[in-house]
Amino acid sequence: MYVTIPTEHFETLPPAALPARRPGTPETTRNAGSYLFFEGDEVKWLYQVVSGVLRLTRLLEDGRRQVIAFGYPGDIVGFPSGGLHHTDCDVLVDARLRVFRRSALESCVGNPELHRQLLQAALGEISAMQDHFMMLGRKSAAEKLASFLHVLFERVGEETDGKRQIVLPMSRSDIADFLGLTTETVSRTLTQMRKSRIIDVEDIYRVVVLRPDALLKLSVGNR
Amino acid sequence: MYVTIPTEHFETLPPAALPARRPGTPETTRNAGSYLFFEGDEVKWLYQVVSGVLRLTRLLEDGRRQVIAFGYPGDIVGFPSGGLHHTDCDVLVDARLRVFRRSALESCVGNPELHRQLLQAALGEISAMQDHFMMLGRKSAAEKLASFLHVLFERVGEETDGKRQIVLPMSRSDIADFLGLTTETVSRTLTQMRKSRIIDVEDIYRVVVLRPDALLKLSVGNR
DNA sequence: CGGCAAATTGAGGAATGTCAAACTGTGTGG
DNA sequence: CCACACAGTTTGACATTCCTCAATTTGCCG
């Protein structure tokens, strides 16, 4: 999952279409805390999230970290470059994953339709990342947070007791490292949004969206 | 061109290998100032830069702009998502371009080897963009500038009169919009690097790298 | 109940942005 | 050929955002 920006041109593309489960596409489950792969590993498999949440990270020697993306249902992770993984990937929420051989992406003999779909997913990834650039480079902390919540709200918002809410399985520092902020700024910005009655923070992991329109407006920003 | 980060794991991957010119791959030339495509256009062609420099940009309604990438020789631009372009692309320096049909990327019937190469280029793009995230999200202005110059130095540095120099065909605000800074900050940071004798700014478009090692060190940062 | 890690809050500071002025180089028209 | 205009760049002064460091607070697990 990247933070994309609503535009006139494009409807938010749905995450890579989830082709119906077929006999030939095995699934696996992984528990929270386990790692799917590390930076530098040879890519053997691609994973499509069916349920659960993944986290992709990249580390600098000095400890600075960037959360590259979160893997939500529909997302595909593990695209190789030079045959290798360029991020670490671990599981935030127990996950069911569809597994594809790397060759299914890289070779079109065998299953051309699957090959095509994985390729399209990779291309969608590129454009989503371009949007994310805009966000990292040009948005304020409030806009970043609002964009992030808005995307989650659209993709995995849940209706409970007539409240539209978001579950955040990641820590504040995950969010910070994803958006290019600090945990303190994330925290402060959330309380501000709470004080302006846009959201309500039920508990650390549960955000109720009181005014979706205001959230969207804030995410677009009015500089 | 993205700003990637030197790591232990990977040598800087050369930009997508430039397969030898073959009869079947037509070239075209475009003059500085002309546009190759606009955001929202249907993708008909992919372009590999042979010579010259391209600029890919994305615009927000309120005028904020992100330069997504610069296209230097070897780079391939125009990857579709949902069949459409998601950036504008124009020419900074008169360019020779190899042209590929979109179908060469999306279909493996016809020219499987070319298909494979374009796919690998797309995958390389993803990993380069991941590095760029780290840069946008986690680096200081000085580190950003140093990283940017370092990458250009490695890729297109020229030796002239025993001086290793970089030609910058883009404006300060292009650089700023690429790195998530303002023109003023770019300018100030350059003068600082000049004062600390890391670079010399011959003229607006010409930077002499006096101490490549110091440039690299600065780009990695020592926070 | 106590201890611990994560989150929040606060105070202060550093980095970067904003706005405005001065400078530079380049092209144009007299 | 010079003078001027203009756009891009640089510099300066100041404002703002966000970060840093430290102190609480909260929630969770033994």
Image (cartoon, coloured by chain):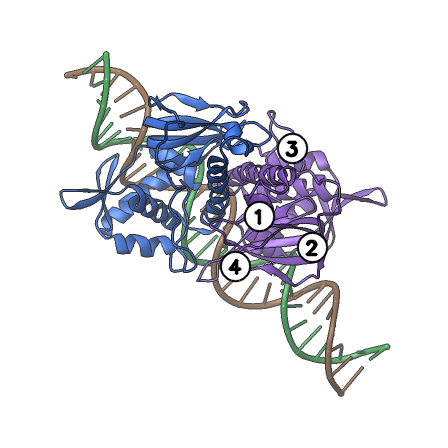
Chain colours: A blue, B purple, C brown, D green
Do the residues at pointers 3 and 2 share their chain? yes
The x and y percentages for residue A77 are 45, 33
Q: Secondary structure at mark 4?
A: loop
The x and y percentages for residue B125 are 57, 40
Q: Are marks 1 and 4 in contact (CB under 8 Å)?
A: no
Q: Secondary structure at mark 3?
A: loop
Q: Which mark is residue B169?
A: 2
Q: Residues within 10 Å of mark 2 (few under 14, many from 20)?
A: some
Do the residues at pointers 4 and 2 share their chain? yes
- Gap between marks 1 and 2 measured at Cα: 32 Å
Q: Which residue bears the numbered disc 1?
A: B103
The x and y percentages for residue B186 are 60, 51
Mark 3, mark 4: which one is toward the viewer?
A: 4
Q: Which mark is residue B12?
A: 3
Mark 1, mark 4: which one is toward the viewer?
A: 1
- Can residue A54 be seen here? The reply is yes
Q: Earlier in the sequence, mark 1 or mark 2?
A: 1
Mark 3, mark 1: which one is toward the viewer?
A: 1
Q: Amino acid at mark 2?
A: Pro
- Gap between marks 3 and 1 measured at Cα: 29 Å
Q: Earlier in the sequence, mark 3 or mark 4?
A: 3
Q: Earlier in the sequence, mark 4 or mark 2?
A: 4
* Drawn side of residue B123 relative to residue A118, left or right: right
Q: Which residue bears the numbered disc 4?
A: B41
